[in-house]
Image (tube, rainbow, N blue to C red):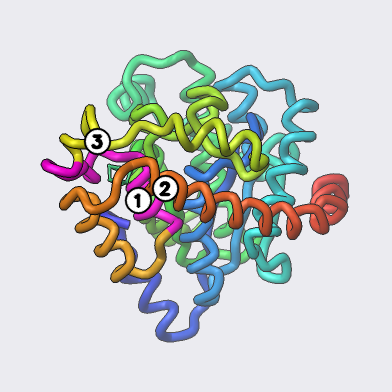
Amino acid sequence: MFGHTDIEKIFEAIRKKQKFAVMTGIKPTGQYHIGSLITCNEVLYFQNLGGKVYFCIADMEAYLHSSVPLKEGHETAIDNIADILALGLDLEDSYIYKQSEEKEVLRLAAIFSKNVTYNMLKGIYGEQAFGAYQSALIQVGDILLPQLGDYEGPLLTVTPVGLEQAPHARLTRDLARKQYFRDLYGFKMPSFTFHQILGSLDGGDKMSKSAGSTFLITLSETEKTLKKKIPAIITGGRDTKQEQIKLGGQPEICRVFDLYRFFFMEDDKVLETRLQDCKSGKILCGECKQDLFSRVNTFIEKHQEKKESKIDLAKQILEL
Ligand code: SF4
């Protein structure tokens, strides 16, 4: 995390053991991937500190942005929910819902739409198709849903997002602070945290489903697919072995190092040693990637074992 709005209030609530909610969600457009783990880990961190998780299956957003039919999104959503359960989401302290079926979210979006102008949305998001603006208002509805009387009532909430989601944070806070809505719903100002975004395996800015499956690592990879993907990851290696031994590698532009830094080397001392070994040319990219392969493969194998036992539960949750 490198930025936030009002996170102090959340930490104060944690210290005082007051109720708060953690808002998150996923667009059911494909398999869960490693890039999504950044948000997931943060959500689980706040849940462990006492937050109730509101987990949204953003199927309306998937339809409006990516033309994914709602029915198709449903199947993917089951898979995504099984992933998050396997990653450790505590169902006892969670509320999982689908946007398209959560009437209060859609109702809030409609009510908010009366209080925004085209210029306001254009100022935040730039020139967009109307569906994108509508989708943004639905997301505001998601973020403020926990504060409605039939849910938790007005309370502090935190929504962990990547920096590219900052416009949603701005719109949500702009609407939540309007006197009309404060009087109507008693909204407390929602908090946000902003985290770094993991780049794609080919060096692109973001590991995302829209970039194509070749450039991301999903939680459904097999040993065989990892053996293809990991050797192909862009690194900060030099053109020749001799050059790398002499000059050292460049971890600051290396996606392999990013994967270690974000997830696969939790011990800071071990990470620092790898950084120095790379920079000094003591380790070369082949060995470094082999190490990454072992770690990712072990993680995914264990995850898939856990996930297998969660599929039926995920179906039950979404088909209630
Ligand atoms: S040695 Fe490892 S960290 Fe360094 S550039 Fe090569 S792959 Fe990246």
Instruction: Identify residue for label 1.
Output: 195
Q: For this view, does 195 lie left or right of residue 95?
A: left
The residue depicted at 47 percent of the width and 24 percent of the height is: 133
Specify the principal SS of the magenta part: helix
Q: Is mark 2 within 8 Å of ligand 1?
A: no
Q: Secondary structure at mark 3?
A: helix
Observer-side mark, 3 or 1, equals 3
Q: Which residue is mark 2?
A: 161
Residue sitting at the far bottom = 16
Can you tell which quarter of the image residue 256 is in?
Answer: top left
Q: Are marks 1 and 2 in contact (CB under 8 Å)?
A: yes
User: Spatial distance from mark 2 to mark 3, Cα to Cα?
Assistant: 39 Å
Name the residue beneath numbered marker 3: 241
**Amino acid of disc 1:** His
Name the one closer to the observer, 198 or 261: 261
Closer to the eye: label 1 or 2: 1
The part of the image, by quadrant, that contains residue 53 is: bottom right
Stretch of the chain drawn in magenta: 245-264
Residue at the spot 56% in from the left edge and 46% down from the top edge: 142
